[in-house]
Amino acid sequence: MKEVINAVEKITGLKVPVNYGPRREGDPPALFANSMKAQTELGWKPKFKTIESIVETAWRWHKTRTKGYADR
C-alpha cells in the first residue's frame, strides 16, 4: 500500500491522508503479485507495467470525468 500511496502522491501532487494501525488478525506479513501465470496460460499482456503508469492513467481519466461514468 505504501508503494501505491507514494505513486498517487507523486502523480497527483496531492497528499494522501494515511492512518497507521496494528495489523489485523489474519493479515499476511507481506503481499506479492506476479502476472506471469495469466500471461502464460491466457496469453494476457499487461497494458501498463509500472504502478506510476497505472496511477497516471487513472488520474487522467478521473480529471476528465468528474462525474465518473455519468459523464459519458
Image (tube, rainbow, N blue to C red):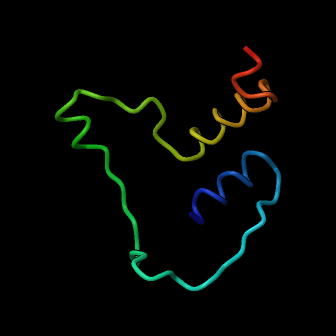
Most foreground residue, 53 or 66: 66
Please, which residue is most extreme toward the left here? Answer: 41
Left or right placement of residue 7 versus residue 46 in this view? right
Looking at the image, is 64 positioned above or below residue 51? above
Pinpoint residue 9: horizontal percent, then vertical percent: 74, 55
Looking at the image, is 45 positioned above or below residue 9? above
Left or right placement of residue 19 versus residue 54 in this view? right
**Residue at x 79% of width, y 24% of height:** 64
**Residue at x 31% of width, y 44% of height:** 35
Looking at the image, is 57 positioned above or below residue 10? above
Residue 21's quadrant in the figure?
Answer: bottom right
Residue 36's quadrant in the figure?
Answer: top left
Count the marks: how many? 0
Q: Which image quadrant: the N terminus? A: bottom right
Q: Which image quadrant: the C terminus? A: top right
Left or right placement of residue 50 versus residue 8 in this view? left
Most foreground residue, 4 or 72: 72
**Residue at x 43% of width, y 76% of height:** 27
Please, which residue is most extreme toward the top here? Answer: 72
Pinpoint residue 22: horizontal percent, then vertical percent: 57, 86
Most foreground residue, 71 or 32: 71
**Residue at x 69% of width, y 51% of height:** 8
Pinpoint residue 28: horizontal percent, then vertical percent: 39, 75
Pinpoint residue 17: horizontal percent, then vertical percent: 78, 65
